[in-house]
């Protein structure tokens, strides 16, 4: 029950983010606000479903509900901002929320089995955070490479303009600079 509820919440949130990514800037803010409101409403529904449970199952259910809300809000913000830094923050926030869920699930165990469970949860968290950081770094490197390629292309165009004179040279240089 709780897994299917979590899946429904996450799927609904994902569809909202896909449509938000194609919206105009004025619509993007409205879609972002709507996604946050939907995430809060979905959280309340998922949290209410936990009320019938007891013990650690209830704690796990509540953490999963919170993780669903965090994921929905983080993805909405990343889509709205559209920057590598926002994507990294979203992925890190989601990893943190998933880590809390995994740690809560470990409370069902004791002794060495619990220790192993917690270490696996920590390793998964650390891996997800590292992936988020690497993804941002790759994105930044690609942007830098695009900029360098453009600059090189503009330099070539300007060099070609050197063979010209007067207004023709000025137009050529202006056209090359427009390519930046």
Image (cartoon, rainbow, N blue to C red):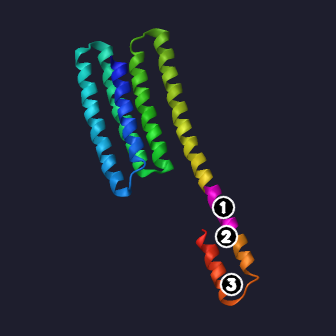
Q: Earlier in the sequence, mark 2 or mark 3?
A: 2
Q: CA distance from mark 1 to mark 2?
A: 10 Å
Q: CA distance from mark 2 to mark 3?
A: 14 Å
**Tag 3, which secondary structure?**
helix
**Tag 2, which secondary structure?**
helix
Find residue 42 and report its horizontal and vertical position in percent.
28, 32
Q: Which of the numbered marks, if any, corresponds to residue 154?
A: 2
Q: CA distance from mark 3 to mark 1?
A: 24 Å
User: Quick check: 47 above or below 180?
Assistant: above
Considering every residue shown, the one lying at the far right of the view is: 163
Quadrant of the rendering where the N terminus is positioned: top left
Quadrant of the rendering where the C terminus is positioned: bottom right
Task: Tell me the quarter of the picture where residue 176 sits.
Answer: bottom right
Specify the principal SS of the magenta part: helix
User: Quick check: 130 above or below 101?
Assistant: below
Q: Residues within 10 Å of mark 3 (few under 14, many from 20)?
A: some
Q: Which of the numbered marks, if any, corresponds to residue 169?
A: 3
Q: Which residue is mark 1?
A: 148
User: Quick check: 174 above or below 101?
Assistant: below
Find residue 137 and report its horizontal and vertical position in percent.
58, 47
**Tag 1, which secondary structure?**
helix
| Labelled pair 3, 1 in contact (Cβ < 8 Å) | no
Viewed as shown, does residue 7 lie left or right of 54? right
Q: Earlier in the sequence, mark 1 or mark 2?
A: 1
Reply yes or no: does residue 47 show up in magenta. Answer: no
Q: Which residues are magenta?
A: 144-153
> Which residue does the image show at 32% across and 21% down from the upper left?
61
Q: Residues within 10 Å of mark 2 (few under 14, many from 20)?
A: some
């Amino acid at each position: 029950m709780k897994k299917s509820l979590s899946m429904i919440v996450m799927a609904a949130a994902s569809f909202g983010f896909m449509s938000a990514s194609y919206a105009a800037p004025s619509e993007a803010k409205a879609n972002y606000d709507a996604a946050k409101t939907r995430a809060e409403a979905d959280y309340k529904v998922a949290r209410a479903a936990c009320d019938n449970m007891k013990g650690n199952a209830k704690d796990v259910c509540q953490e999963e509900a919170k993780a669903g809300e965090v994921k929905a809000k983080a993805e909405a913000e990343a889509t709205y901002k559209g920057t590598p830094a926002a994507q990294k923050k979203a992925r890190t926030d989601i990893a943190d929320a998933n880590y809390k869920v995994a740690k809560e699930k470990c409370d069902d165990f004791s002794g060495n089995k619990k220790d192993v469970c917690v270490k696996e949860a920590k390793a998964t968290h650390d891996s997800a955070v590292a992936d988020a950081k690497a993804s941002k770094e790759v994105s930044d490197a690609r942007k830098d490479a695009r900029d360098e390629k453009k600059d090189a292309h503009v330099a070539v165009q300007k060099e070609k303009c050197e063979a010209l004179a007067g207004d023709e040279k000025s137009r050529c240089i202006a056209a090359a600079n427009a390519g930046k």
